[in-house]
Amino acid sequence: MASGWNSIRHDSTKLKNQPLTAQTLKQDADMLSYLYRIAHEFERHHGASPNLLYLGYHHFDQLRDALPDLDSTAILKSLDMELILQRDIPHPRVAWSPLSTKAV
């Protein structure tokens, strides 16, 4: 799996310097757990790490809330995936594409 996931799992234990509710903390942890699980399942099933992450705007907000010490650019770099944001994505999903816009 992409090495970025290890650093994200460690960073997910850090809390924001804002009042948080139990529900907010659970949603943030659930988002990280869900993304880790679908990336791991994808890699196990396909033999390659995903390089695309499809998220709705709300999901991306949850991801940023789960990683308060990282800005959006750092989160994407840590994920080692390209992000595709769309309004109508009901659930986050991952994929692999041979066409990458990342610099080699």
Image (spheres, rainbow, N blue to C red):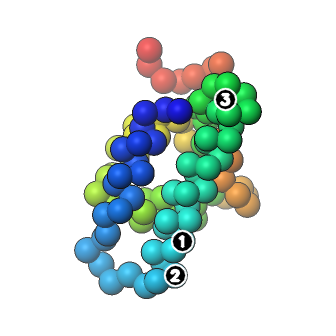
Is disc 2 in contact with disc 1, using a CB cutoff of under 8 Å? yes
Q: Which residue was labeled with disc 3?
A: 96
Mark earlier in primary sequence (1, 3): 1
Three-letter residue code for mark 2: Gln
For the residue labelled by badge 3, is the local secondary structure a helix, a strand or a loop?
A: loop
From mark 3 to mark 2, how far is it between C-alphas? 32 Å
Q: Nearer the viewer, residue 87 or 5?
A: 5
Q: Nearer the viewer, residue 44 or 98?
A: 44
Is disc 1 in contact with disc 3, using a CB cutoff of under 8 Å? no
From mark 1 to mark 3, how far is it between C-alphas? 26 Å
- Most extreme residue toward the top is 104
Instruction: Determine the residue positioned at 42% across, 65% down.
Output: 65
Mark earlier in primary sequence (3, 2): 2
Q: Residues within 10 Å of mark 3 (few under 14, many from 20)?
A: some
Q: For the C terminus, which image quadrant? A: top left
From mark 2 to mark 1, how far is it between C-alphas? 6 Å
For the residue labelled by badge 2, is the local secondary structure a helix, a strand or a loop?
A: helix
Instruction: Determine the residue positioned at 53% across, 24% down.
Output: 101
Q: Which residue was labeled with disc 2?
A: 23
On the picture, is 51 further left or further right than 12? Answer: right
Residue 71 point in image, percent of width and height: 33, 52
Instruction: Determine the residue positioned at 59% across, 30% down.
Output: 49
Q: Is residue 76 above or below residue 91?
A: above
Inspect this view and state whether residue 55 appears.
Answer: no
Q: Which mark is residue 97?
A: none
Q: Is residue 71 above or below residue 104?
A: below
Residue 52 point in image, percent of width and height: 61, 36
Three-letter residue code for mark 1: Gln
Residue 96 point in image, percent of width and height: 67, 29
Three-letter residue code for mark 3: Trp
Instruction: Determine the residue positioned at 44% across, 19% down.
Output: 103
Q: Which residue was labeled with disc 1?
A: 27
